[in-house]
Image (cartoon, rainbow, N blue to C red):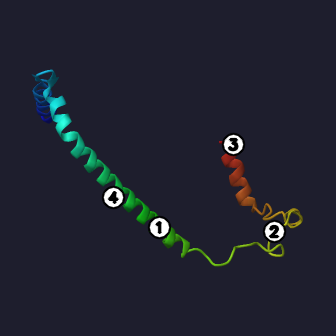
Amino acid sequence: MIVLRSSFYFCLSFAILSIPFGDHTLFAHLYKKTAPLVNSLYETATSYGNKGLHAGKKYGEKLFSSSGPAIEDSVRESSAATTERRKSDPGPLDHYSDEERAMIKKLTRE
């Protein structure tokens, strides 16, 4: 219902604005009268929007610049795992009981 009503009002507005007055339509005459006002409103809104964006950007930069750590994080070589250590320590080995091995064989057969 709302789609039909909106379509009806759109068509009615279009028909009214298309009525010719002199050598131009009603829309063209209204545009000539309102264009300077609309342009000044647009420029004002744009300038206020840009000021707000710049203020928000400055606030965000200030907020995040003060929240970072004062020191850099680094990894010392003595505490890092090396490739030699990884090769010598293979990790957990296969330690299954006989019951667990039987269950694994049974599961893999099915």
Q: CA distance from mark 4 to mark 3?
A: 73 Å
Closer-to-camera residue (30/60): 30
| Relative vertical location of residue 15 with respect to residue 101 in this rendering, above or below | above
Q: Name the mark nearer the viewer: 3 or 2.
A: 2
| Relative vertical location of residue 12 with respect to residue 63 in this rendering, above or below | above
| Quarter of the image where one finds residue 1 | top left
Q: Name the mark nearer the viewer: 2 or 4.
A: 4
Q: Residue at x 69, y 45 (%)?
A: 108
- Which secondary structure lies at badge 2? loop
Question: Of callouts 3 and 2, which one flags the residue occurring earlier in the amino acid sequence?
Answer: 2
Categorize mark 3 by other alpha carbons within 10 Å: few (<14), some (14-19), many (20+).
few
Q: Which residue is mark 3?
A: 109
Question: Of callouts 2 and 4, which one flags the residue occurring earlier in the amino acid sequence?
Answer: 4
Q: Residue at x 80, y 63 (%)?
A: 93
Question: Of callouts 4 and 3, which one flags the residue occurring earlier in the amino acid sequence?
Answer: 4
Tell me the amino acid under the disc marked 3: Arg
Tell me the amino acid under the disc marked 4: Tyr
Closer-to-camera residue (39/53): 39
Q: Which residue is mark 4?
A: 48
Q: Which residue is mark 1?
A: 58
Q: CA distance from mark 1 to mark 3?
A: 66 Å
- How many marks on residues? 4
Tell me the amino acid under the disc marked 1: Lys
Q: Which residue is mark 2?
A: 81
- Which secondary structure lies at badge 4? helix
Q: Residue at x 27, y 49 (%)?
A: 40
Q: Residue at x 15, y 35 (%)?
A: 30
Closer-to-camera residue (80/8): 8
Categorize mark 4 by other alpha carbons within 10 Å: few (<14), some (14-19), many (20+).
few
Q: CA distance from mark 2 to mark 4?
A: 55 Å
Q: CA distance from mark 2 to mark 1?
A: 42 Å
